[in-house]
Amino acid sequence: IKNKNMSKAISQVPFAINEPVRTYEPGSDEVKSLIATYKKMWKEKSAIPMIINGKEVKSEEKVNISSPQDHQHDLGYYYKGTMANVDEAINTALAAKEKWNNLGWEQRAAIFLKAADLIAGPYRDRLNAATMIGQSKNVHQAEIDTACEFIDFLRFNVEFMTEMYSEQPVSDTGIWNRSEYRPLEGFCFAVTPFNFTAIAGNLPSCMAMMGNVVVWKPSDKQVLSAKVLMDVFMEAGLPAGVINMIFTDGKETAEKVMSHPDFAGLHFTGSTKVFQGMWKMIGNNIDLFKTYPRIVGETGGKDFVVAHSSANVEAVATGLVRGAFEYQGQKCSAASRAYIPKSIWNDVKNVMESQLKTIKMGSPEDPSNFVNAVIDKNSFEKCKGYIERAEKSTDAEIIFGGKCDDSKGWFVEPTVILTTNPKYESVCEEIFGPILSIYVYEDQDWTETLKLVDETSPYSLTGAVFAQDRYAIAEAYKALENASGNFYINDKPTGAVVGQQPFGGARASGTNDKAGSKMNLMRWVSVRSIKETFVSPKDYKYPYLG
Ligand code: NAD
């Protein structure tokens, strides 16, 4: 009975290709349709429930949802859960486990391939618009994250899953060896950040794809698009209890989950401190668990751009403007510190200036706004603090931007801080806002500067070198070997594409398990090796015994 769904075919899944990015040119039908959806959703007053065991769960506590671009606009509320809801989600997941685990992999694949097609088609505008409203992304940023990256995660992960399943050991004469990729024993926990709807969707779904059951706690700053993701999963046919979405306090939830004997894996993306706190909790409770939990965390960054004197000036300036200011610098991969040689600095600065003065800032409802609002008051205040301290500092000056306006939304101008101190606070710390720090070095100090880049921050997520001189590229390539998990040559350090540049960093940036790759999926399975002997020996004596 257990194997009633075992397949009678070695099926092949559709070949994964990256979802084409819609361009949303002014006046196009696609931009009209997206903005019309945005306007419609803007007027909706949501009442967003948790989803546990496939059912809507409401609670006593309602938390208002507002938009970063208009903090007084009422978008409704979500229901904040209690620790009883965490228990319910864990128990539900464990109850769903056996049936889900026994379902053939093709059935699981079909659900997630269907989810990808739903997002590519009927849900695309709604999911993009929810991200634009709730997380303040412009049409392009919403499209590359919400639609394309998540569709890619789903389709490529299905392909990687089948590649993994196909990896089988050799068999000697008379025996048959097999590897079985079992899901983890127990339940998994996904904790996701506000800044990428694709990450919010991928963390729980890739674990479920591998046969696991999941408790998912999204960021409370991403509930609008989290709701749409859950709608998609359910329409795609994800059985009740496989992914349970709860809106609960992060720390308390983590404490509860990580003291449960069946806790089997943590899939986290967010800030370094929070991840380190959770790792400590797991360590403290290690004797409680039935199995050693898998721990995957992708965390903060302080991503660099280092230019050589041979670099193309326009390429450097464009890499900085896009890399530092797209999505208001709220990408873990955002360029936030740059090292420019003196000989080209004036030219780089002039090109940046000419680009920055054309940048418009405002609500994503107007697609011509390149920069939108930062996520919330905390982020706004944090950015303002760095700007005010730079204004007063003798080590630093603000050379572009610096204005902050919270009268309607959380708007911080794209800001460039020029510093003479390579260890100035804004060069070392993750700000997670539209603030770029620049240090100008003497051309002859190229080799020392590479060392500085490597040693300045505890992070190692992304980084870029700009140079035409191949010896310089090769030197940076080697000197910065451990300074980033994703390294770019003559390109901005953001915008990794699933299947093309597997993403993740080391040091304080995470466990580097590369989201959207087979390496990541491997963490959510526990391999069983099977050896079958066809004709078993009947006597204990080996030939050497005579
Ligand atoms: P965050 O750490 O504040 O929150 C992430 C998640 O953890 C949220 O769901 C939050 O509710 C939860 N949380 C908060 N405090 C918690 C606690 N004490 N215990 C357990 N859970 C808790 O991060 P954020 O502001 O949502 O996202 C921004 C951060 O994420 C940045 O540091 C960024 O670099 C990082 N990030 C990294 C990557 C990557 O791939 N390396 C990708 C995206 C974001």
Image: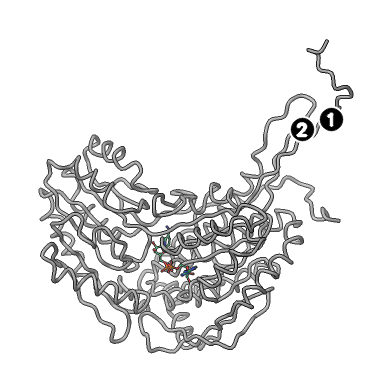
Disc 2 secondary structure class? strand
Q: Quadrant of the N terminus?
A: bottom right
User: Residue 449 shows which numbered tag?
Assistant: none
Q: Of residues 24 and 109, which is closer to you in this image?
A: 109
Disc 2 to disc 1, how far (Cα)? 8 Å
Q: Position of residue 288 (x, y in %)?
A: 64, 59
Report if the beta carbon of the residue with label 2 is closer than 8 angstroms to ligand 1. no
User: How many residues crowd mark 2 within 10 Å: few (<14), some (14–19), many (20+)?
Assistant: some
Q: Position of residue 92 (x, y in %)?
A: 70, 70
* Callout 1: SS: loop
Judging depth in this view, the residue of 154 and 202 nearest the camera is: 202
Residue at the location (13% across, 57% down)?
420
- Residue type, numbered disc 2: Trp
Residue sitting at x 15%, y 61%:
418
231 left or right of 445? right
The answer to whether marks 2 and 1 mark residues whose Cβ atoms lie closer than 8 Å is yes
Q: Percent x, y for residue 228?
A: 55, 74
Q: Residue at x 60, y 70 (%)?
A: 232
Q: Which residue is mark 2?
A: 176
- Count up the numbered dots: 2
Question: Foreground residue, 545 or 77?
Answer: 545
Q: Taking 424 as reference, is 531 above or below it?
A: above
220 shown above or below 213? below
**In the rendering, at what x and y percent does residue 482 appear?**
35, 43
Q: Residue at x 78, y 29 (%)?
A: 175
Coloring applied to the structure: one colour
Corner quadrant of residue 386: bottom left
| Residue that label 1 marks | 534
- Picture quarter with the C terminus: top right
Q: Amino acid at mark 1?
A: Phe
